[in-house]
Amino acid sequence: MKQYNKNLWPITLAKCALIVLAGLVFYFGIESYSRVEVDSIAERTLLTQKRLISLQQRAFGSESDIIASLILDDELLEKIYEADRRPLERARVGRELQERYFPLFVKLSGEGLNRLRFRLGDGSTLLCVEDTNLSGESRFYSSSAAGVLKKGRRPLYGFGLDREGGGYRALYPLFYRGEYAGSAEISFKFEELKRALEDVSERACRFTLAIRYDLLEKSLQKSALKGYTQSFIDPAFAVREDMLGDLEVLKKAKYRVELLPYREFYTVLEDESTQQELYYTVGFIPLTLIDGDMAGYYIVVHKDSGAIAQVMSIAGIAYWALALMVFVSLVLTIMVHIYRAKAHAADIDALTGIYNRRGCLKRLKSGDKRYALLYIDIDHFKRINDTFGHETGDMVLKEVVHIISAHIRKDDVFCRHGGEEFLLFVANASEAQAAAVAEKLRKHIQIHRFEKVGDLTVSIGVAVRGRNESIGSLIARADKNLYKAKSEGRNRVVPGKQAEKRE
């Protein structure tokens, strides 16, 4: 017997949980998609920045080679060799070189050249022509670099440090008649590298250096350290004070990260100080000095052209659409539950939990089975109500329903017709089979002991639905047989044929 399940809320809540779970799956899918897309954009940006730095350094290398080809002639090599072998001649040779190369340095300093230095074989400086604003000895020329120059007989190119933030260096070994005499250094300011890189990126990128603070302390004089300040990103590194403005977006975001150990990485930050969506890709590219030591990072702040904002905008729309879909689905699920609950409640007898007459008729119309009807009436039910009260009467009705429900099939339709009367439609049963079912139910009720009331009996009228017979007609015939059962003394079953014979 199919009855209304009063406790549908767990099923509805389970459906809601599945909707929320599906929403979470889609949410994390959208988040994963946006993260992958943003990472892809950031990685391409970082790769482009690395290539720009590499290309610009090669350009400085080519420019250094051109300058070296102009100044490193046989006359210079002979003078350097003479000064290296004759210490007493060094002052004179230095003055001669000063007179010869200072005008050239002045011309080239406007193109970013900031130092022209000649060293002897022992590493001492013979001549250093440099920007008058520059002070502090730089670390880039080390004993290891000198050894490589002397042994490799080839130039070294790379980065060197000074108070100005460092810059691009080129070291050229000087040999005279096959003997190592010293080296020549051609240096360009970092500002020139920075300007060239930012011009190529159409000012979309800001290039800054973060140098290990302990390295600066060891390499520079105290007066030279005044141009640096410890970085808010990692106090173990320092940044030139005049370049702090390039890191403003990181400062606003309160970005902190340990920069050691050295590795290449990036982060994506949103500028929340503006109303429009504005993102920055910040790349951290390890900085290697000319002698091969790690010294810090190029910090490249790239203003997004709109690609990241577009991805985040699409993701934002997807989030809102998903939230709306989940909300609508939840509302519809609950509304359907409420509608079905109300619809079922209209078809169910509130006291016993089985179908009422309306629900019974709806159920019968939805099926195509042939039914036999048992019209059941509790004998002397009014006396029970009058003697024991209506609460006891309600208890009796529930117990009778429980007994009958326990002995019928799921295809049978059981309902309360009204008061103490019940209708049981037995599916695909002949009159003899229906009468047997009725007799079994009558006996079960008769032997049952009802609380307070004690013994109880029922009378049952049986009728089998004829071909094309209406439900109303079937009920009327069963009611006739029930009337016969009661008039003959109650506690009995009266089938259709028996009723027809006695009429």
Image: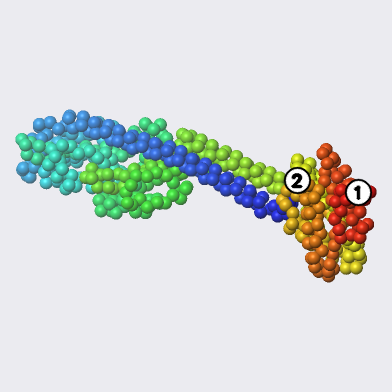
Residue drawn 17% across the image and 47% down it: 144
Q: Position of residue 349 (x, y in %)?
A: 81, 53
Q: Quadrant of residue 395?
A: bottom right
Tell me the crowding category of disc 1: few under 14, some 14 to 19, or many 20 or more residues within 10 angstroms, Cα based. few
Tag of residue 83: none
Towards the viewer: 38 or 180: 38
Q: Quadrant of residue 443?
A: bottom right
Towards the viewer: 497 or 37: 497
Labels 1 and 2 touching (C-beta < 8 A)? no
Task: Residue 416: tell me if it is visible.
Answer: no
Towards the viewer: 351 or 455: 455
Q: Position of residue 348 (x, y in %)?
A: 79, 51
Residue drawn 30% across the image and 33% down it: 55
Helix, strand or loop status at disc 2: loop
Task: Residue 179: tell me if it is visible.
Answer: yes
Looking at the rendered structure, the number of numbered marks drawn on it comes to: 2
Towards the viewer: 59 or 229: 59
Q: Position of residue 429 (x, y in %)?
A: 77, 47
Helix, strand or loop status at disc 1: helix
- Residue under circle 2? 428
Q: Nearer the viewer, mark 1 or mark 2?
A: 1
Tell me the crowding category of disc 2: few under 14, some 14 to 19, or many 20 or more residues within 10 angstroms, Cα based. some
Name the kind of residue labelled 2 in the image.
Asn
Residue drawn 27% across the image and 32% down it: 59
Q: Quadrant of residue 130?
A: top left
Q: Position of residue 207 (x, y in %)?
A: 37, 40
Name the kind of residue labelled 1 in the image.
Lys
Residue drawn 18% across the image and 32% down it: 68
- Residue under circle 1? 501
Q: Is residue 65 left or right of residue 29?
A: left
